[in-house]
Image (cartoon, coloured by chain):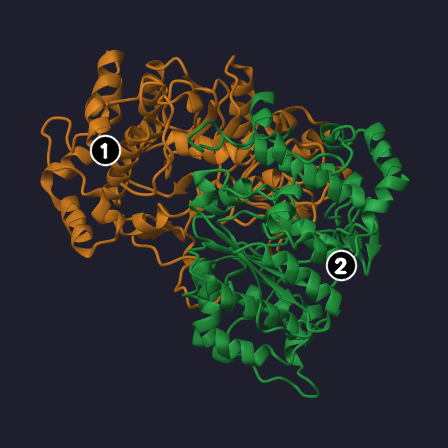
Chain colours: A green, B orange
Amino acid sequence: TPGILGRYTWLDYDDDDDSPEKACNCSAILRGERQALEQAKLLTLTKDFRKRLSVPDQFYVNATKDCRKFKSSRKYLTFPLSWEEKDFPLAYSMVVHHKVQNFERLLRAIYAPQNIYCIHVDLKASPSVLAAVSAVASCFPNVFLASRRESVVYAGWSRVQADLNCMSELLGTGVAWKYFINLCGQDFPLKTNLEMVRALRALNGANSLESEKMPKEKMWRVQRGVGKVKEPPPFQLPILSGNAYIVVTRGFVRSVLEDRRVLALIEWAKDTFSPDEFLWATVQRMPGVPGSMWASTKYDVSDVYALARLVKWQHHEGERASIHAVYPPCNGIHVRAICVYGVGDLQWMLRQRHLFANKFDTNTDPVAMYYLEKYLRQRALAQIEGKGFKATNVTSGL
Amino acid sequence: TPGILGRYTWLDYDDDDDSPEKACNCSAILRGERQALEQAKLLTLTKDFRKRLSVPDQFYVNATKDCRKFKSSRKYLTFPLSWEEKDFPLAYSMVVHHKVQNFERLLRAIYAPQNIYCIHVDLKASPSVLAAVSAVASCFPNVFLASRRESVVYAGWSRVQADLNCMSELLGTGVAWKYFINLCGQDFPLKTNLEMVRALRALNGANSLESEKMPKEKMWRVQRGVGKVKEPPPFQLPILSGNAYIVVTRGFVRSVLEDRRVLALIEWAKDTFSPDEFLWATVQRMPGVPGSMWASTKYDVSDVYALARLVKWQHHEGERASIHAVYPPCNGIHVRAICVYGVGDLQWMLRQRHLFANKFDTNTDPVAMYYLEKYLRQRALAQIEGKGFKATNVTSGL
């Protein structure tokens, strides 16, 4: 609808802030058209494009000295696009340690003034990263840095603690947020804010995260502590298996911080391997936790049915006809067995129900994020309805 | 909203067609209030109420001699309540063999003129049942009896064949129905037609039915035929476990009737025990079947997450704190290990996502169905919006 886009053109992304190029041939990319995909790959090779790729941390410190100019040139949305969104604020924790460009583009893609964003910068992050992220945050009243920072270690408790720190501070703000979503610096959304709000409303107060029967091969993680055999879980809680990424109600977050059973579980979990991969999944099945499910395996939710995160594990890739494959092969590259998405993955990604996908990296395929940014922004603008902020139903394509 | 109900009062159910009693205290029942529940139980004991319970088959033959009067006195909806519903017709198969009163009240509860209904009357049904059901069907241009009738036998192929007969005839009508739902005479809806249409639209073309990894204890069913060991499944299809009740797209139904792999699977399944409990679940994971899922266990759907049917199995009942229980105990009675619902189950049932629940029986708890009828009709009328047939969002209670 050219009319509506015409009204908000200043919010639409030019191909280049300095020199507008041809508009995103988003629909062709998303139909998976070979020619468009190849053009996209060629784009990655152009000197101009690659020049724009490596943005030093200092850039953000400079650019945010004038916040109004920064927000305007980067085209941050500075007003809610609908009453529906305004009445349904979201809370985010964003755990980052490097790659500030990825982080800032992620923030811009999810930013809305009614939401609230807690950024946890790793204790080990370089001073230039901390300075850059601080500078960006300082331009927004609803974006803040977590005051307690952890040194996040692979498979250690610190990953969970980072989220707990943000959860606690988010609850302490005055914002009446309804759902909490945790992100890392290499995530990217697959939905506009309005689409996320609608998906969350449709949950009717339930949480959405992976929570399944603990597979035998992972049981050792909760049977062994550091140099000892672990005592059974407190309150005889059944321990379930999941992942680090959650989409949960405010009530769930309160239980995590206040329910004595969860506090005991947290103490018990501190010396285990990858506690993030069973803690949330376990809380999600405890009676009395808002939005939780019964413990019976009939209520198990796999990562493909949870809204939280779309991740492609190399060993799960394959063809539809294969009885064990979970999704088609990665069109990017693999880093530690996880697909870093390429443009060829976009068509499939946007058909999935998940709110966010992991991983993206401007260093490996900058075009994938580029197209996704433009596509989502165009969708968000197209979803604005009339004068009374009544947003239209979501259409499934441009 | 008294205004809207006022406009359609002739469609609201009186407590008694002859002598209006006090209106349904539906909200109290649905909040599970003890006093209201006890009043409801007392109602079951009143002479008037019980008198209305046993309706002879002949009644329907007489009452439908004047179709206009029948439809008007029974308050069948004779116009679509919204454009949304009109544009999204549903196809039903209804497999019945007795209890005509249950059947007719079920039909009335789901009837809408834009939908299409195929009724399979068991070959073994008494002549009075056949006559009664025929008579009711004859009053509606969009309700017909299946021309091929089976003698349905417990755990036998005939149960599937009954649905196949209806599927075939439904495809052959001129109605552009989008989804197919199969019912038996003791089912009852938990949603208005509009709510069902919205739930189905939200599926975005997916089917919704139980489809899970075949548990070890059920494998014998597909390993033994009649007096012999079975050959492996055709096309090396993975056999999954589910139940008889499905909510599927038109495309799924076409595959069932035309896809040569499914036709081969059907032949293979004819001599197995309870083929209805693996056939649909298996087709649902075949590549190329519209609305199907990948075969990986990550895509398994349990009966609690499928929309098709809410059933309480006695051995799965228990308390929330129990790690094996699936749902709270039955408030009615059990017949062959399945709960026949009572009024005390209503509050829980209406919070579930399922479109239909099984079982109901006016002979054991007539009040449960009575309240559900009235509640759903009131909701349907309340969902009518304005002059332009734009239906309101569903509110979760009266």
Secondary structure under tag 1 reads loop
Secondary structure under tag 2 reads helix
Q: Please state the horizontal and vertical placement of residue B222, each as a whole percent of the image.
A: 65, 46
Q: Which residue of the protein is positioned furthest toward the bottom in this rendering?
A: A228
Badges 1 and 2, same chain: no
Residue under the point 49% across and 54% down: A179
Counting every numbered tag in the picture gives 2
Horizontal side of residue A285 vs B105, given as left or right:
right
User: Which quadrant holds residue B390?
Assistant: top left
Label 1 CA crowd tier, 10 Å (few <14, some 14–19, many 20+)? few
Label 2 CA crowd tier, 10 Å (few <14, some 14–19, many 20+)? few
Q: Chain of mark 1?
A: B
Q: Which mark is residue A58?
A: 2
Q: Chain of mark 2?
A: A
Horizontal side of residue A69 vs A345, given as left or right:
left
User: CA separation, marks 1 and 2?
Assistant: 60 Å
Residue closer to the observer: B330 or A182: A182
Residue closer to the observer: B397 or B302: B397
